[in-house]
């Protein structure tokens, strides 16, 4: 099924400038490393800077205003490093802050929701689509709204799955507790006979085996990370912002607002390789007013 209105919500009138500059990616924590990995695979020549707001994770249980403030500070921090494009890897931040960031940032901004919706619409055969995410993402209605542009609302089935994030962070990927949570949350979606399920959270791709076991192989699982990476490649090409191909891979640089106790294990779970060389950014630094021209314009409403 073709996507209607699945275009990237980037501000068409803006360009980011120099092709050599890095791409900035932020998430509420370390789950966005699944998106970083997809970008690194798709765009090997690009330098990527990742910021994870590990001091304030989770965003998924918080209200719109807090998430929007955090997202603005995360974006400002990355802009201060001279990025040419901003990727909002966090679904909850995409749900609550993407429109705002697109409006106020002086460069292209991509989120994960539109690419996930577009991929789901391409893949669904029967037009019965489910979406799962944090409480914030599902209650924002953004995925449902995107899908409803192309399929009737009674064929869209959304569920919040708040226990999935802590289960993944604890590494309980193949565990009876996770199977129980999967059954609890996904039974209504299985009963609704969906044919496609959007994994609308950075953490859910690592639960694919448990989810696929329960939903059955005929249900297509859509992970926004790959679709986002494809959209980022298009956007860079359109705006002549793509880095020249080169022999070596681009650099990956990591910033976190806190180093969690299980940092190494959790990071490896999402990135598939150990993370070394992390710089911490204090919450004071994040909240600092920035006056440089690359900064996010303040919302005065
Ligand atoms: N990154 C969040 C998301 O994709 C999940 C973790 C959180 O709740 O902050 O919605």
Image (cartoon, rainbow, N blue to C red):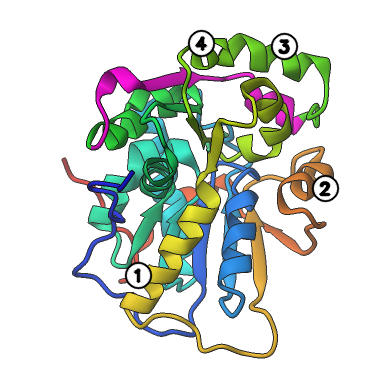
Inter-mark Cα distance, 3 to 4: 16 Å
- The residue segment tinted magenta is 150-169
Q: Nearer the viewer, mark 4 or mark 2?
A: 4
Residue indicated by mark 3: 180
From what the image shows, is residue 117 above or below residue 84?
A: above
Residue indicated by mark 2: 264
Inter-mark Cα distance, 4 to 2: 38 Å
Q: Secondary structure at mark 1?
A: loop
Left or right: 245 with respect to 196? right
Mark 3 or mark 1: name the one nearer the start of the chain: 3
Q: Nearer the viewer, mark 2 or mark 3?
A: 3
Mark 2 or mark 3: name the one nearer the start of the chain: 3
Residue indicated by mark 4: 191
- Name the disc covering residue 292, or none: 1
Residue in the foreground of this view, choosing between 185 and 156: 156
From what the image shows, is residue 39 above or below residue 70?
A: below
Inter-mark Cα distance, 2 to 1: 34 Å
Mark 2 or mark 1: name the one nearer the start of the chain: 2
Q: Secondary structure at mark 3?
A: helix
Q: Does the rendering let one see residue 288?
A: no
**CB within 8 Å, label 2 to label 1:** no
Left or right: 232 with respect to 281? left
Q: Quadrant of ligand 1?
A: top right
Inter-mark Cα distance, 4 to 1: 53 Å
**CB within 8 Å, label 4 to label 1:** no
Left or right: 186 with respect to 123? right
The residue shown at (57%, 16%) is: 186
């Amino acid at each position: 099924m073709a996507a209607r209105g699945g275009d990237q919500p980037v501000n068409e009138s803006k360009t980011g400038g120099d092709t050599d500059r890095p791409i900035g990616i932020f998430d509420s924590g370390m789950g966005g490393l699944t998106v970083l990995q997809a970008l690194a695979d798709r765009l090997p020549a690009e330098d990527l800077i990742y910021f994870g707001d590990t001091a304030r994770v989770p965003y998924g249980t918080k209200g719109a205003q807090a998430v929007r403030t955090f997202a603005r500070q995360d974006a400002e921090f990355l802009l201060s490093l001279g990025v040419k494009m901003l990727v909002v890897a966090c679904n909850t931040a995409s749900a609550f802050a993407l429109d705002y960031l697109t409006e106020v940032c002086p460069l292209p901004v991509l989120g994960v929701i539109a690419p996930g919706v577009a991929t789901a619409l391409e893949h669904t055969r029967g037009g019965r689509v489910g979406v799962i995410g944090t409480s914030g993402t599902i209650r924002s209605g953004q995925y449902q709204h995107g899908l409803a542009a192309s399929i009737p609302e009674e064929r869209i089935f959304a569920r919040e799955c708040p226990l999935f994030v802590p289960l993944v962070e604890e590494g309980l990927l193949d565990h009876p507790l996770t199977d129980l949570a999967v059954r609890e949350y996904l039974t209504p979606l299985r009963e609704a006979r969906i044919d496609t399920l959007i994994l609308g959270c950075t953490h859910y791709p690592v639960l694919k085996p448990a989810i696929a076991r329960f939903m059955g192989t005929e249900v297509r699982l859509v992970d926004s990370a790959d679709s986002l990476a494809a959209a980022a490649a298009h956007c860079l090409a359109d705006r002549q912002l793509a880095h020249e191909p080169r022999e070596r891979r681009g650099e990956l640089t990591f910033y976190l607002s806190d180093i969690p106790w299980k940092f190494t294990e959790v990071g490896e779970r999402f990135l598939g390789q150990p993370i070394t060389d992390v710089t911490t950014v204090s919450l004071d630094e994040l909240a600092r007013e920035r006056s440089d021209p690359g900064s996010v314009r303040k919302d005065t409403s």
